[in-house]
Image: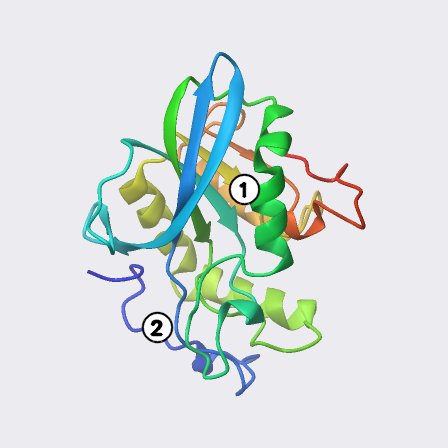
Amino acid sequence: MAINYMKDFDISVLENYHEEGAVLPLPDQYVGELKVKNGELFFNQAPRDSLEYLSDKFVFSSKKNYHEKNIFVLLESPHRFEYNASNKPIAMVMGKTGCNLFDLFTQALSKSKMRIKAGLYNVILANVVQYQTSCGLNPIDRKIRDLNWLDIYNNYGGELDLKKRIFSGKPRYTINCCTGGKNPNGLRQVVNHSLINFGLKKGKHFTEGNHPASWNFHGDTSRAVID
């Protein structure tokens, strides 16, 4: 069992890696359940449970069984708050991003054009690239983050790893909340193109939304948007 399908990838080999950055990947994680009933959405946060991938499926680290159906929420890569002072992984969406996601997820999703069928779903967060491409720099250098992200995704098997994780998780719905917005060269659009190439149909199998870090700006939640 493994965190991903990239085998022993070493992020420190990248041209734009900074030596203070973490080298360990952060696993995808179950964070709760989404209940859809009579057109209403209810999200119940739960203790984190990491995913461990096998050849064509995954199991939860706790060995628990949750619901049959999954929703994947994609983010671009781990941030510095998701690692401790020793650069060991803690958990996904720590700090503001997590607060916004958990508080506003159903609000954003209720406005989406993608309609989710009634039922119970595991909500699973997954970084498209599970390595800290920002290298923990403070303040974040978005150029360095994007260069490392694209290098891994295009040249070190990152796109194939994402495809294998999605095919193993078999999500009923995938929500691409990577950074990059509508920029045709942004990371979110790169992932959209991949999802389409994987055979997913936009509006039916997947959609996109603003990064949760932007969902609440001093009380303004108008950017809590999932298309």
Task: Please give left or right for residue 59 compared with residue 225 in the image.
Answer: left
The vertical placement of 16 against 213, above or below, is: below
Secondary structure beneath label 1: strand
Residue with the mark numbered 1: 176
Quadrant of res 134: bottom right
Dot label at residue 144: none
Taking depth in this image into account, of 221 and 117 the one nearest to the observer is: 221
* Pair 2/1: label in front: 1
Position of the C terminus, as image quadrant, is top right
Q: How many marks?
A: 2
Is the residue 173 above or below the residue 221 in the image? above
Q: Residues within 10 Å of mark 1 (few under 14, many from 20)?
A: many
Q: Position of residue 203 (x, y in %)?
A: 54, 24
Q: What amino acid is at disc 2?
A: Phe
Q: Is residue 169 above or below residue 22?
A: above
Which residue position holds label 2?
A: 9
Q: Position of residue 52 (x, y in %)?
A: 26, 56
Among the two numbered marks 2 and 1 on one chain, the one whose residue lies closer to the N terminus: 2
The residue at the point 45 percent across, 84 percent down is 86
Q: Nearer the viewer, residue 57 or 147?
A: 57
Say left or right for 70 vs 19: left
Is residue 95 shown above or below 71?
below
Crowding at label 2, few (<14), some or many (≥20) Cα neighbours within 10 Å? some
On the picture, is 165 further left or further right than 78? left
| SS at badge 2 | loop
User: Identity of the amino acid at label 1?
Assistant: Asn
**Which residue sits furthest bottom?**
19
Residue 84 x, y percent position in the rendering:
48, 77
**Residue at the location (53% across, 57% down)?**
93
Q: Residue at x 58, y 45 (%)?
A: 101
Percent position of residue 200, x then y: 43, 31
